[in-house]
Image: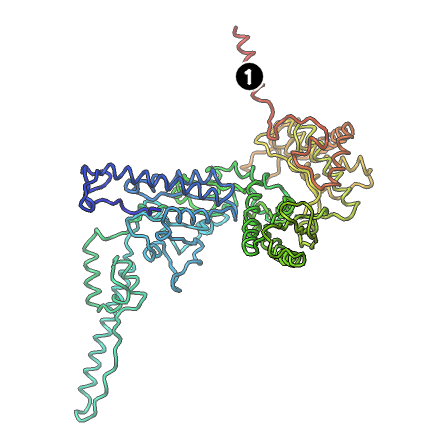
Amino acid sequence: MEAMTSPVTTTTTTITTTTNAVNIDNETHNAQTLLSNRVALRQQVLDITANTLKSELFGLDTLIDRLIDSVRAWYLLPEVIDRPVIVCLWGLTGTGKTQLVRRLAQLLGFYDRFLEVQMDGFSNSTRGMTRDSIAAMLASSSIVEGEPGILLLDEFQRFRTRDRKGNDVAVKRYQDVWALLSDGRLSPPMDALDRIELEQAYHQYEAMQARVDKANEESDNDDDAPRKKPKQQSPFHLSAYDARDLQHALKLSEPITQIMRWTPDIVQQRLEQFRNDPSRWGTDHSKLLILVTGNLDEMYQGVAKRVQDCDTDADVFHRFTERLSTIDVKEALSERFRPEQVARLGNQHLVFPSLDRKAYERLIADACSKQVDAVRSALQLDIELTPAVLKTLYQNAVFPVQGTRPVFSTVHAVLGPSLGSAAVWAMQKLAQAGLAHRRSQCRLQLDMSDDGKQLVMRLQRVDETDSIAEQSIALHLEIDKLRERAQPDFRALLAVHEAGHGLVYALLNHCAPTDVRINVASFEGGYASYAPRVAESRRMARDEICVTLAGRAAELWVFGKDAVTTGAEEDLSSATRHAARYHRHWAMGDRLSRTDVTHDVEQHVNTDIDASNAQIEATLQTELARAQQLLQDARAPFEKLVKALLENGCVDAKQFAAVTGLELPAKSDALEPWNAAWQRFAANDLQQVA
């Protein structure tokens, strides 16, 4: 694979040269032909890189294509680049941002010119010497000034320059990063030169004073006194730190140990030469590819904090996070950085959505396949994992907000020991059956028991369905154990309550809820989830209150007034909040003014909130009664849904219509038919004009 270096031409050839021919190895080549061939070759490298990344990082195909497009000009024609190419990658933890950047550098042949900086300011060190500037780290790296290279600024969100109140934060390290992001050109470290020059002057003074003191001492001594043996002196005149700073500041090619031997006169001479040659001032890194990565929890609106959620389907989080854009990124960045700093990060912001269910399933299958292949090649025995095993691993491994790391941890902890035990058991059984020498004709199948608590090991011949031997071993599946609701009364309560929410939502919106679940590990309870909508009408606002109260309505209907539970507390709070905004903020009741409490004279609101309290309560009572009536009119679907929840623990959107027998033709994100209303309105105007 070709690394991106300067084109193989003489010094007379550049992109803008008028020279038509180039001499290489005593052969004449057309410059335009060489350029075309190089661009074509690198385009092939980009295509191979994109395909390789897509095969290794699941669920990121669109982002990989955008990243490749963003670096295309920089990679194909580095000569035309006059300022750094900046691409920012933002996402939840464990979505593959850093891995993608490192792999990109490898595949493009740039790993020898790749520098990774942790922007927390404390994770970088080189031979025990911490770096306070990006320039110093670049100088210590293999990236050559003025040549293309890749710089990764990782965990950039930790480099915040504004606190949560919007006040400036004093940041000492890496302050030159903003100049680097601006145009790639860094100012010369004149402060370091001044310090070195001052230290050299001090050393010269000390040396001169020592010679004077020695001369005075010798003149005072008696001529007949025996002379002392002269002391050994160090050959070094500079410390390693000063020599390193001098090397970086003056852009010297000499090794540090040689610079350490320079006398103050030599150092002073080099400093004067540098100061008298402005062409050597500053550092040019304008051809860098700068990749910024980080986690901006602010733009995920609470999703990032749901680290314990292993119950919500990964597709739910994926649909929410894939809608985020550059606008959301800039809004989140403005809470951490000053406006001019946000501007220097540019507009190339790639937002990583959380992985969807399909990506997690591929990830688990791939991780399992690697472990199985290792055992298979060692034992020469075919091993098969059934879909039930992969499904069980998914249920216990996936925390959608935490990304891939919990998946690898669970696969290793659950499958690794079980696979080892199964292999040992299979070898013993093959030996007992006299088939040890014919292992290649046999297969070890790993399946789940009917109750989902044990791993079933079946040893079979490849061409037969009957088992040579079969045995089950217990699996430690902590998440599945947490999801068990062994107490029948509690399961019945959860099923009735959540069925009320889910069914009323379906009846009012003519579409299935995203998920209705009572086997929850994240907390003691259940939930019904719905697709968010970008706008809400007056009717939709009333429907949302009705759906929120439907759990309490189901409890009243099935259990009676005295048996309703405290589990509706959050529902009641949410419904009350929604009803209050309905009347006080949205002007959907009898009052038009914005009603609220305030102590600020500049807040022009109607502070008469008492009058709206009765309206809020009336709305809640009306919507509760409506929810009760809807459930009673749909008793058969309600009973089917409750029974399905008791039996399976959950009903997702794909199953909902089949379980309840309802026709649900609407889309989950459907809005009020405002466009159709506008078309009717416009058509009436045209008819009146005619």
The quarter of the picture where residue 669 lies is top right
Q: Would you call the spot at circle 1 few (<14 residues within 10 Å), some (14-19), or many (20 or more)?
A: few
Q: Is residue 119 above or below residue 44?
A: below
Disc tally is: 1
In screen coordinates, is 636 left or right of 412? right
Q: Is residue 144 visible?
A: yes
Residue 134 or residue 212, whichever sits in front = 134
Dot 1 lies on which element? Answer: helix
Where is residue 508 shown, x and y percent of the image? 68, 28
The residue under the point 38% across, 50% down is: 151
Label 1, on which residue?
679
Residue 56 or residue 532, whichever sits in front = 56
Where is residue 104 shown, x and y percent of the image? 41, 46
Label 1 amino acid?
Gln
The quarter of the picture where residue 65 lies is top left
Q: Is residue 309 visible?
A: no
Residue 196 or residue 608, whichever sits in front = 196
In screen coordinates, is 365 left or right of 507? left
